[in-house]
Image (cartoon, rainbow, N blue to C red):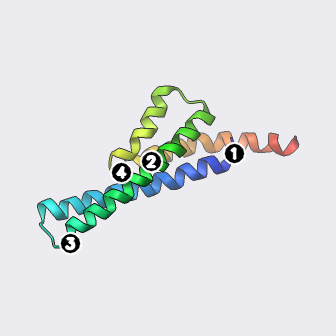
């Protein structure tokens, strides 16, 4: 597995996580605090999160298939982009697990 596959996943996990937290804050501003402009911000952030979550799904699925994860783990990683802050924790665990695997495979590829 190439390091770029893990890097793409990591970037999208952070982007998705940040947008989801921002979306929650916008919704609090819209529904709880009744702030001016919060409805427009909520709309913009929700659209951005929705489209970028689709990219996150593609990259996470690609990573999981190349890492040969079981279906249950794959689903957990895919759903992490829907729970605020979960993407950050899942990304950290996945990165720790796979960075060692990528480092093991790198010398083997260099020798070939």
Q: Residue furthest right?
A: 112
Mark 4 and mark 2 in contact? Answer it, CB < 8 Å. Answer: no
Q: Nearer the viewer, mark 4 or mark 1?
A: 1
43 shown above or below 74: below
Question: Which residue lies at the image location 45% right of the left edge and 27% below the top edge?
Answer: 72
Q: Of tags 4 and 3, which is closer to the observer?
A: 3
**SS at circle 2:** helix
Res. 54 mark: 2
Q: Secondary structure at mark 4?
A: loop
Which mark, by number, is residue 85?
A: 4
Residue behind mark 3: 37
Which mark is first along the chain, 2 or 3? 3
Position of residue 12 measured from the top left corner of the image (x, y, whole percent) = 49, 53
Q: Residue at x 60, y 47 (%)?
A: 6
Q: CA distance from mark 4 to mark 1?
A: 26 Å
Say if mark 4 contacts mark 1, CB within 8 Å.
Answer: no
Q: What residue is shown at x 17% (from left), y 63% (from top)?
A: 30
- Residue 37 x, y percent position in the rendering: 20, 72
Residue at the spot of label 1:
2
Image point (42%, 50%), residue name: 53
- Mark 3 / mark 1, whichever is N-terminal: 1
Judge whether 6 appears above or below 36 on screen. Answer: above
103 relative position to 111: left or right: left
């Amino acid at each position: 597995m190439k390091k770029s596959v893990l890097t793409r996943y990591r970037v999208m996990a952070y982007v998705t996580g940040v947008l989801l937290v921002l979306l929650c804050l916008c919704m609090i501003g819209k529904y709880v605090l009744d702030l001016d402009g919060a409805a427009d911000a909520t709309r913009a952030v929700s659209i951005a999160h929705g489209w970028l979550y689709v990219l996150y799904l593609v990259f996470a699925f690609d990573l999981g298939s190349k890492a040969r994860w079981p279906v249950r783990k794959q689903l957990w990683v895919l759903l992490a982009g829907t729970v605020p802050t979960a993407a950050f924790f899942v990304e950290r665990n996945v990165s720790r697990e796979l960075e060692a695997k990528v480092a093991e495979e790198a010398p083997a590829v260099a020798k070939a």
